[in-house]
Amino acid sequence: MNSSKKEIKRELILKTVSQIVHEEGVEKLTLEAVAKRAGISKGGLLYHFPNKETLILGMIEQLSNNFVEEFNQKANADHHSRGKWTRSYMETSLFGDREENDLYTALSAAHFTNPQMLQRLRDEYFEIQDKIENDELDPVRSTIVRLAIDGLWFAEMFGLAPPKAELRQRIIEQLKASIKEDE
């Protein structure tokens, strides 16, 4: 199988994993269910992912790679070095290209299956935090912005009294202003 066909098949499988976990829960994630819904043989699935844990790890890796790539691209495209990592984190987290539900699904699946699967994501977040702390801004302020963005995302993902649209926009504007005040 050439690499582009292999990658397309892999993406189909990972999207299917995300759909099953999101719609039916991690307890319904089986190799058989993924193969059936993806329209491939179980042997074809096993070629790419030998077990349930590798399916979940693959989903986390793909989403994490997409997030980190987008985060780095936005920061590198920013013409103002001061605060670029903090701005990039806000933009990528709030308005990124990825599907938010997919990330929530991957994190939930990993947490309930084997919390150690989140280690790579933890490592990447340590790198992100390091960039934010060394962003030519007050590191306390830039970290507060990151944590506020994470809290907003968390409230929206779990439906824990997320702010209404107008208030959400005002919060984002205030976070952006707090970075500018430091410039």
Image (cartoon, rainbow, N blue to C red):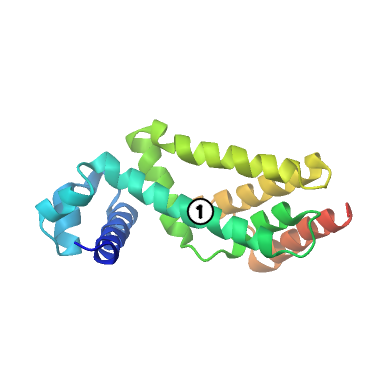
Query: Which residue does the image show at 28% across and 58% down from the upper left?
Result: 10
Closest to the observer, 155 or 58: 58
- Which residue does the image show at 43% across and 45% down from the upper left? 107
Q: Residue 120: where, in percent of width, then height? A: 46, 38
* Residue 56 in the image, given as x and y percentages of width and height: 32, 45
- Residue beneath disc 1: 157
Residue 165 in the image: x percent, y percent? Answer: 65, 67
Q: Can see residue 136?
A: yes
Residue 105 in the figure: left or right of residue 96? left
Task: Tell me the SS state at disc 1.
Answer: helix
Q: Is residue 72 found left or right of 174 in the rendered image?
A: left
The amino acid type of the residue labelled 1 equals Met
User: Is residue 105 in sight in this rendering?
Assistant: no
Farthest residue to the front: give it. Answer: 2
Q: Tag 1: Cα neighbours inside 10 Å, few (<14), some, or many (≥20)?
A: some
Q: Quadrant of the N terminus?
A: bottom left
The residue nearer to you, when weighing 17 against 131, is 131
Residue at 40%, 47% in the rendered image: 60
Point 72% across, 64% down: residue: 78
In the image: residue 149, left or right of residue 134: left
Q: x, y percentage for residue 55?
A: 28, 47
Nearer to me, 165 or 117:
117
Q: Quadrant of the C terminus?
A: bottom right
Quadrant of the rendered structure where residue 69 is? bottom right
Vertical arrangement, residue 109 with respect to residue 65, above or below: above
Counting the numbered discs, the total is 1
